[in-house]
Image (tube, helix red, strand yellow):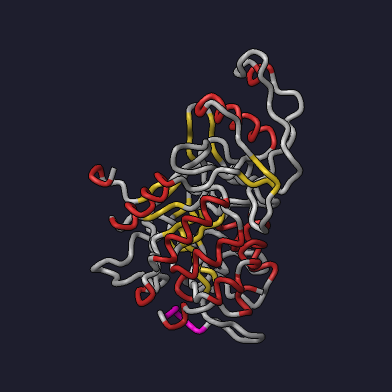
Amino acid sequence: MYELGVRSMFVCHKYDNALCGVRFDSGTQGAIVNIGNLLGTGRFWQARTCATAEHDNTIEPAGVLPGQIARLLPPGISLPAYPAPPHCNTRGLTSLGEHMVQGMMRRGMLIEIDHMSVKAAGRALDLLEAAAYPGVVSSHSWTDQRYLDRIWALGGMVTQYGHDAGEFVAEWRRSAPIRQAHQVAGYGYGLDANGMGRLPGPRSGSAVTYPFTTFEGVTLDRQRTGDRVWDVNVGNRSGPGGDPVGDAERVLLVQDPRLPRPALAGGGHDLPGGPPGDQDALAGGGIQAQQRTGVGSPERGPDPGVDLDRGRVEVTGSLLITAGTSIGDGEQPRGPLTRAQLAPESPAAVG
């Protein structure tokens, strides 16, 4: 895989495999994936009531399965009953899985911790900590939140799932103290649009004007897929310009007026509480959405959100929302961000 150019991998994803057990799905989706686990491995997920604070997602009773799904089960087989939650997968990181994690570290690869069972993720983090290896990523927070501290302590990267704007901001605030403790300047965004994950719905009152210009100066219009036209104002997000980062910025501005007003996509996005065209330069914003293109480039030098001294991990093509300068009551933005200002987020910036 490395010879083919692969530099980041999930050790396991939706189904248990020879390397590790997975973090379950819940609800009807969980029932469907559990049937897939049976068909792929010969058995349903094996769960116990957790004896630790860390836990996997709850396997909920499926009720009556739709006929299209029920017919996938072998004759006489039904979904199992599980013990009381919280649920933990009995399968962790196997010896072969440990060998794979060690091999990925030797090759300098990024290890995806998401989708591992807590038993597998805990063991993987033990191995990473023993080697002081920072190349660990939670690309859409599909792991127990108690592990985020360990990931950031290693110098790894965490991105939040693409929730609706309000939920996205709430989680951004909740995890702020942990990020501050580890001097994490940025905050990751991972949409995880894989066909099964729910995409964020339209924000009430959303009024994005098409076409608009991205941070890189590219003009984007509504995406068309066959007869479907994707519009952030009227339906679920998909494709270019369809994520809730801009909505999250608006929610932040409404909730905390001390934050300076950032520009989005070089203009064209009026912000609440101000007249049309009320935008500041991106470099002076308190919340800065920036498309990352690597750990630096000859033209730009090191990216400001990467702590090179600590070996903090950078993932090509991911989106970070970085806090701007410290803004107190009555203060105004103090101009473009500097590297020194991209240390811990200020209390005012995170509420």
Q: Quadrant of residue 269?
A: bottom right
Would you say 233 lies left or right of 17 here? right
Q: Residue 89 location, x and y as percent?
A: 60, 44
Quadrant (top left/top right/bottom left/bottom right) for the C terminus? bottom right
Quadrant (top left/top right/bottom left/bottom right) for the N terminus? top left
Question: What residue is drawn where x is 57% and y is 28%?
Answer: 43
Say whether residue 335 is magenta: yes
Q: Which residue lies furthest to the front in this view?
A: 95
Q: Residue 288 location, x and y as percent?
A: 50, 68
Question: What residue is drawn where x is 52% and y is 80%?
Answer: 325
How many labels, in total? Answer: 0
Between residue 310 and residue 273, name the one nearer to us: 310
Question: In the displayed structure, would residue 208 be above or below residue 301?
Answer: above
Q: Residue 262 location, x and y as percent?
A: 53, 69
Between residue 325 and residue 216, name the one nearer to us: 325
> What main secondary structure does the magenta stretch of the protein show?
loop
- Residue 309 seen by the camera: yes
Would you say 225 lies left or right of 104 here? right
- Residue 10 seen by the camera: no
The part of the chain drawn in magenta is: 334-338
Q: Residue 117 location, x and y as percent?
A: 56, 47
